[in-house]
Structure formats: structure tokens, C-alpha cells
Amino acid sequence: MQDTTALEASLSKKARRNHEHVQTAAMLILFILLAILILIPIYALFVASWKPGDELLQYGLNLDPEFSKWGLSNYNLLFFGDHDYWLWFGNSMILTVITVVLTLLVSSFVAYGFAAYEFRGKRILFVIVLAILSVPFEVIMLPLYQQMSDWGLMDNYVAIVLPFLAHASTIFFFYQYLQGLPMSLIEAGRIDGATEYGIFFRLIMPIMRPAFAAMAILNGMNAWNNYMWPLLVIRSSEKYTLTMGLNTLINPYGDNYSLLIVGAFFSIIPIFILFVAFQRYFIEGMTAGAVKG
């Protein structure tokens, strides 16, 4: 009887182990397929960046390298040509850095207030934050435009950054992360005589580094790729962002596919660097912010 029970337990354990192996293999295959789907457009863009612009105009993007047609003409145009690409690139870089820093700071303040303090109307305000998550940008685009116009902020970078400083999804993520931290840290800081700002900057922010890294990547991608809102509020060509500037390369009076394709490929590099810089914290931050406790 004991031998039979032990055999059944061994078989059950082996079956569970085989099931786990199958699950692991299935997940690995799924992620490999997703990676291929993501990398194919990037590969096509990379291949096209080495070909003359008229090839892209004639045949479009394709996966055939055709090494015989490769050359440095597009890259020479990018780095040494007469154009405004690097002006647009610098504008986008400055806007992205400012947007990420201010959004993380303001949103973390708001989330910390929700997580650490009790005040009248707290639940109603938090429900409003959650409700904003379900509102598409297109719904509030025109009211925001009218508001920026009334404030005299049109054709000003402030109009790009200001409306999104308290970002609803970032606030919610930080709030979830803070819910998993022991609030005894705040009490200990108060007992030691630290101010409320001192508690936040000296005790809470160092612990939130994984959350800041995760949100820096996501907000950085959004700010770098932002097109619709800057297109509405920016008028001067010298203030164009990279997405706006690249769009001007295709117009009814002429197309500059050579600069467009190599410029589009080069625009991926800052986001790649951002992810590499913070990837050690990214998974930890996303996992910790996804669950409470």
C-alpha cells in the first residue's frame, strides 16, 4: 500500500514537472514569435536606410537586403547635408527630458499624497484619476487646445508639457507601488524630525527607483513619439519636434525619402539607449507596481 502511494506521488510529481516544462516551452515560443514580429519592421527600416531614396519610392520597404545597392549616401546626407534634422532632434530631446523629469516628479507627489495621507474627498479624487484613464486623448484634445489658446501658450513648448504633468496612468502606477511599502517609514521619519518633503525625497524616492525607471521608459517613449499634440500647438518651423519635422519631408511639392528613412531609423536610438540604461530596474518596477503587498 505504501509502495503504491509513493508511486502515485512520484508520478504526480513527474506529471507536474512535465506540465511546467510544457508551459515554459510554450511561453518561450510565444515570446520568440513576438520578438520576431517586433524586429521585422526595425530590420526593414535598417535595410532601407542603406539604399537610395528612389529605391524606397519605387519598391517600398522590403526584407531583401540587396547588398549591391547599399551605400553611405543616406548617412552622408544625415550627418553632413543641409537640413534641419538635428534641430528637430535636439528639440525632441530637450522636450522629452523635461517632460519625463517633471511628469515623474509631479505624478509621484500626487501618488504619494493619495497613498500616505487621509483627507476629505480623497476617494472621489482618486476615482476621478481612474476615470481619466478611460478617456481617450482625442476626446479632450479640442478643449485642451482652446485652453492653451486662452492662456496665450500657443507656439510654446510649455503648451506641450503642461497638460500632461499629472499623468493619470503614472499616478496610478506610483500609487500601486507605494501601497506595497511600509508606511512605518513615514512615521519613523517624522519621529526623527524630518519634514514631509524630507521624508519624500530622502526616504521614499530612493525606494521608488524601480518604479521611476519603469515610468521613465514609458513616459519617455510617449514624449519622444508624440506627434498629434505638438502638431496642434506648435507653429514655428524652428520649434518642430522630430516627428513633426520628419512628416514635412513628404509633401505635394517633393519627397526626401533618403533623409526620411535614415532619420526615422536613427530616431529609434535614443529610446533604445533609454531602455538599456534603465532595464535593470524595469522588470522589478513593473512587477512591484502590478501587485499590492
Image: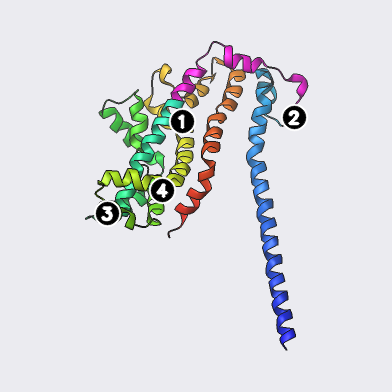
Question: Is residue 56 among the parts visible in the rendering?
Answer: yes
Q: Residues within 10 Å of mark 4 (few under 14, many from 20)?
A: some
The three-letter amino acid code for the residue at tag 3 is: Tyr
- Labelled disc at residue 227: 1
Between the residue at mark 4 and the residue at mark 3, the CA separation in whole angstroms equals 18 Å
Q: Earlier in the sequence, mark 2 or mark 3?
A: 2
- Say whether residue 102 is magenta: no
Q: Nearer the viewer, residue 287 or 258?
A: 287
Which labelled disc corresponds to residue 97?
Answer: none
- Along the line of sight, the residue nearer the viewer: 253 or 156: 156
Please state the extent of the stretch shown in magenta in the rendering: 64-92
Circles 2 and 3 in contact, beta carbons < 8 Å: no
How dense is the environment of label 3, judged by Cα within 10 Å: few (below 14), some, or many (20 and up)? few
Magenta stretch holds residue 89: yes
Mark nearer the viewer, 4 or 1: 4
Give the residue pinned by disc 4: 207
Mark 1 belongs to which amino acid?
Tyr
Residue at screen point 74% across, 27% down: 65
- Disc 2 + disc 1, Cβ < 8 Å: no
Of badges 2 and 3, the one in the foreground is 3
Rendered-image quadrant of the N terminus: bottom right
State the residue at coordinates (74%, 80%): 7
